[in-house]
Amino acid sequence: MTKKIAVFASGSGSNAENIFNYFKNNDKVTISLILTNNPTAGVIERANRLNIPFVVFDKNAFKNTNEIVKLLQENNIDLVVLAGFLWLIPENLIEAFPNKIVNIHPALLPKYGGKGMFGDNVHKAVVEHKETETGITIHFVNQHYDEGKVIFQAKCKVLPTDTFEEVASKIHALEYEHFPKVIADLLLTFS
């Protein structure tokens, strides 16, 4: 039976496309839906180009209704993947998909996690604090930013001369290499 993934993204959607490409020749896994809270997000153009249905929603629908939960259930979604999605996940969604929502964070949690710590904000903090290594964390999602159980981490070196852009480039490489593989491994544990 095909496992169905829904990807939530707020930005360009490069991770969403990378995940799509990883599974595109796999008849056991499909990205069934892309959801975004940003009507101008680049992920919409990617969804159109890749022929993946997408939904744009607002904060009220997300936080105060069951619309998103119902949409995911109607589409028989097995796993919810957050790929650069910036809003805190509401309790009703976490309860509907227990241990079936995963996020990727561009640092080695618990360092540089929490509200406001995303994208370049993280990479700038890593450089400013003169860290010698950073990396990615893939974790289950709970009701707090970046505090769910860690599934996987990968590290890279930070050189004293690295700019935040160079750190970002190293992190993107780790994300593209590892995120789809971890998703694939996780789906194998689902009955």
Image: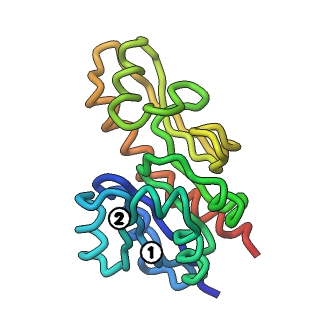
**Placement of 163 over or under 175, stated as above or below:** above
Amino acid type indicated by mark 2: Glu
Image quadrant assignment for residue 162: top left
Q: Residues within 10 Å of mark 1 (few under 14, many from 20)?
A: many
The quadrant of the rendering that contains the C terminus is bottom right
Indicate left or right for 125 with 166 as reference: right
Q: Dot 2: what SS?
A: helix
The circle drawn on residue 17 is: 2
Measuring 26% from the left and 30% from the top, which residue is drawn there? Answer: 165
Residue 99 drawn at (x, y percent): 71, 58
Amino acid type indicated by mark 1: Leu
Total number of numbered discs in the rendering: 2
Residue ranking furthest to the right: 191
Residue annotated with mark 1:
33
Measuring 56% from the left and 52% from the top, which residue is drawn there? Answer: 89
Q: Residues within 10 Å of mark 2 (few under 14, many from 20)?
A: some
Indicate left or right for 80 with 60 as reference: right
Residue 4 drawn at (x, y percent): 56, 77
Measuring 28% from the left and 67% from the top, which residue is drawn there? Answer: 44
Q: Dot 1: what SS?
A: strand
- Mark 2 and mark 1 residues within 8 Å of each other at the beta carbon: no
Measuring 66% from the left and 47% from the top, which residue is drawn there? Answer: 142
Residue 179 drawn at (x, y percent): 50, 54
